Image: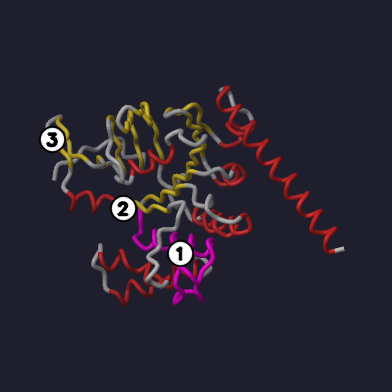
Amino acid sequence: MTTTATDTEHLVHAVNVTKAFGSNEVLKGIDMTVDAKEVVCLLGPSGSGKTTFLRLINQMETLTGGRIWVGGELIGFEDRNGKLHVRKDKDIARQRARIGMVFQRFNLFPHMTALGNVIEAPVKVKRLPKADVTKEALELLDMVGLGDRARYYPSQLSGGQQQRVAIARALAMKPELLLFDEPTSALDPELVGEVLGVMRNLAEEGTTMIVVTHEMAFAREVADRVVFMDQGVVVEEGPPNEVLLNPQEERTKSFLRRVKHEAETEAAHDAELARILEEAAG
């Protein structure tokens, strides 16, 4: 097999990545690197291209232009004497198996238990012995705080529990890289913390993660680097405290002001609701 290697000190290396859907150019030349054991949070308004970038890494979409390497291997294509050739489906599946992805919506199989969801890919894709996979899956469910829910079906679990099963499912493939696409956005506020807690633990254990998130406190606390995207380009990137507390670009400042305003409005609404409920109870 012919592959093209790049600077292997970076686990992920994206060069001039573009993506268009018809006449709509969603990504306009993204350059980005992510090192092993690094946590990078992608921030930005809706429609800025964050999710599309993750989907390109995981080959759920096809590049319009540019190249992405993961672990020194060109994703989706082979470079033969300077010409790109689309990889065969089996080879793409092999590459995709190295990358785990956790979605906004949990995407669990409703007819399978939590355990069944976690063991499905290692057994069917990697052809690993079911007994060995089951033992590891139970350990993963225990790690995400669901050791006592292994035999439950998704409909019997809360949203936060379903998302933690989805994280265990991604980890079961032993990926080199974990991608998170706004993993808490579909959760009720009281369930967000339990999912972020699992992600904090993964970061502490040295898991390489790219996280699309609107949770600013999580990004500031856990990320090694934050990347602010807007209108298909990287506007600003750097350590969390620099970008979030002292942004240099006006687009970043405007976005953070809007996020702060929305958070304050929501807090005021919650306080008013609490007051009304207290008066009603009194």
Q: What type is the residue that disc 3 sits on? A: Arg
For the residues marked 2 and 3, what is the alpha-carbon distance in whole angstroms? 23 Å
On the image, the x and y values in percent for residue 51 come to 42, 41
Of badges 3 and 1, the one in the foreground is 1
Q: What type is the residue that disc 2 sits on? A: Arg
Residue 273 against residue 17 in the figure, above or below = below
Report which residue position mark 1 lands on: 165
On the image, the x and y values in percent for residue 278 come to 82, 59
Report which residue position mark 2 lands on: 98
**Within 10 Å of the Cα at label 3, are there few (<14), some (14-19), or many (20+) other Cα atoms?**
few
Which residue is depicted at the point 38% across and 39% down?
A: 52
Question: Closer to the N terminus: mark 1 or mark 2?
Answer: 2
Which residue is depicted at the point 57% across and 57% down?
A: 197
Which residue is depicted at the point 63% across and 58% down?
A: 190
Q: What type is the residue that disc 1 sits on? A: Val
Q: Is residue 162 magenta?
A: yes
Report which residue position mark 3 lands on: 80
SS under mark 2: loop
From the viewer's perspective, tell me whether residue 268 is left or right of residue 57. right
Q: Which residues are magenta?
A: 147-175
Question: Closer to the N terminus: mark 2 or mark 3?
Answer: 3
Which residue is depicted at the point 33% across and 30% down?
A: 18
Pick the front one: 14 or 186: 186
Of badges 1 and 2, the one in the foreground is 1
Picture quadrant where residue 22 is located = top left
Picture quadrant where residue 151 is located = bottom left
From the viewer's perspective, tell me whether residue 259 is left or right of residue 48. right
